[in-house]
Image (cartoon, helix red, strand yellow):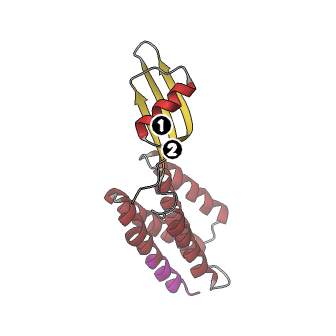
Amino acid sequence: MPLAASFALDVAAILILVFALYFPRHRRRDLVVAYLSVNIGVLAVAAAFTSTEVSIGLGFGLFGVLSIIRLRSLELNQQEIAYYFVALAMGVVGGVPVSPAWLVPILMASLLTAILIGDHPRLFNRYRNHRMKLDTAFTSEKELVAHLEEMLDAQAHRVTVRRVDLVNNTTDVEVRFQLPKQVR
């Protein structure tokens, strides 16, 4: 695939990722510019590496450094990290010559499809994960689970106690739960 066509495909794919998938679902304006600039930046760096005598190892090293720096500079949830890595991967795929040529659009479509399905609002839409600070120090897991299920009106699937403070009478807990089916 000609490099210009690969670049155009990458730009189209990142626009779909950001404006058709990410922003309508998550509404974080600050990450729009991050995803766009990371993708185009990686695309440019990957293209520059392929036009010079630079090893692929150096390219993947840069890929790793960019991701570590970016992920430590802002708190991201798991879905946003997935979008971030798809943006990075599409930039790499679009910036390096891939043979056979039909593989580039297939790889980009696969990445977009993974996000489309994996982050679809209807997929596991009743499941939640919350970290909470309760105003009671629970030392009994059974009582804690019963309290959380009543408070959340949901079925607790996993409860992880992060801290019990008997002096201030608090419990820090992470709970994974399932909301009940909506009655129509």
**Number of dots carrying numbers:** 2
Q: Relative to the observer, which residue lies in front, 145 or 2?
A: 145
Label 2 packing within 10 angstroms: few (<14), some (14-19), many (20+) = many
Q: CA distance from mark 1 to mark 2?
A: 8 Å
> Magenta region, mostly helix, strand or loop?
helix
Residue 24 makes an appearance in the image? yes
Q: Three-letter amino acid code at disc 1?
A: Glu
Relative to residue 7, is residue 141 depicted above or below? above
The residue under the point 46% across, 20% down is 137
Say whether residue 29 is left or right of residue 138.
Answer: left
Query: 125 or 119, which is in the foreground?
Result: 125
Compared with 87, 65 (above or below) is: above
Name the residue at 51% across, 44% down. 177
Left or right, 101 with respect to 5, comes to right
Which residue in the structure is indicated by mark 2?
Answer: 177
N-terminal of the two: label 1 or label 2? 1
Q: Which quadrant of the rendered structure holds the N terminus?
A: bottom right
Which mark is nearer the camera, 1 or 2? 1
Q: Secondary structure at mark 1?
A: helix
Residue drawn at the location 42% of the way across and 63% of the way down: 35
Near mark 1 (Cα within 10 A), the count class, few <14, some 14-19 or many ≥20, is: some
Residues at circles 1 and 2 in contact by the CB criterion of under 8 Å = yes
On residue 120, the disc is none
Q: Which residue is mark 1?
A: 149
Q: Is residue 177 above or below residue 184?
A: above
Q: Which residues are magenta?
A: 1-12
Q: Where is residue 46 drawn, in percent x and y?
A: 55, 69
Residue type highlighted by circle 2: Phe
| Identity of the residue drawn at 53% across and 49% down | 68
